[in-house]
Image: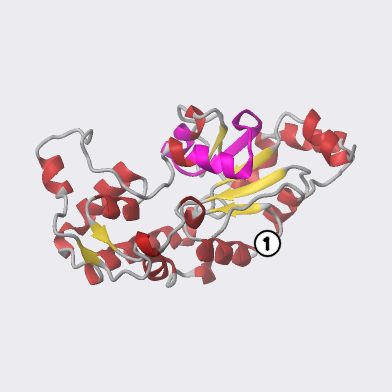
Amino acid sequence: MEFDDLYAQSAKYECLLFDLDDTLYPLSSGLATACRQNIEGYMVEKLGIDKSKISDMSNLLYKNYGTTMAGLRAIGYEFDYDDYHSFVHGRLPYENLKQDHVLRNLLLSLPIRKVIFTNADEIHAAEVLSRLGLEGCFEGIICFETLNPTSESDGKGLRPTASANIFDILEHFSQHNDGSDLPKTPVLCKPSEVAIKQALNVANLDPERTIFFDDSVRNIQAGKNVGLHTVLVGTSNRVKGADFALESIHNIREALPELWEEAEKSDGVRYSSKVAMEVTA
């Protein structure tokens, strides 16, 4: 039996599952702010939504559907996913992201599977990892396209438009409704437990032997609900559902020294990439 197989059987954890944005790099990069502005721009320019409604509408969609995109699709807006991602991510200030040699060395020092799990599209994920200098650190990327494969029947190439019956989410909540009867979205994304379980299936992961890193409290809590070990990134304040809390992803070794203790026991053997994993479009 190979050394990496022996390590996988003896170690407490078999995989580190990482969110991407605001997890592998700090919120101070400004990408999150730019992304939000681009989403609002798309809603105005491409979908014709009244600018005065954008802020409240965006907040409600994000809160109730996980992403604004998922919410827009739920309430009746139709658009090509690639066009949306190109508009929202294609003009981000990627130059704010710098090569992170410290994180790269931390990741490569562990003989354990490492996988990215993001709601973003594949092109954005690849660009971020390239800018951070983290290519080759991960076995694969579970992204938007992984969980939402498209075809012509899904509206591929569809021009942005509103259907005849747009669900008025602002009016819905102004009537003090609790959101229990909101329309369903066709988009699968975090923090949906279904989405997280699907990601685990794609990567062939046992939640009880997987550590999930994310900057979102609700994503962490959803991950905990499906059995994952959880690490909230971006704050040292541990919340319900988080097993650990890290101010920065760079603090991973101080918070989880057992990972490196297991690595030392394995005599520095690196994990193999022989596990079949189909995670991108």
Res 217 visible:
no
Q: Is residue 217 magenta?
A: yes
Is 62 drawn above or below residue 8 in the view shown? below
Residue picked out by circle 1 = 135
Instruction: From the top left corner, tell me how far across and down residue 24 is, in percent.
Output: 57, 52
Magenta stretch, main secondary structure, is helix
86 sits left or right of 49 in the view = right
Is 56 drawn above or below residue 11 in the view shown? below
* Residue depicted at x 57% and y 38%: 212
Instruction: From the top left corner, tell me how far across and down residue 50 is, in percent.
Output: 15, 64
* Residue depicted at x 77% and y 49%: 274
Q: Is residue 140 magenta?
A: no
Which colour scheme appears in the figure? secondary structure
For the residue pair 150 and 268, the one nearer the viewer reads as 150
Res 198 visible:
yes
Magenta part of the chain:
196-222
Instruction: From the top left corner, tell me how far across and down residue 173 is, in percent.
Output: 15, 41
Secondary element at image label 1: loop
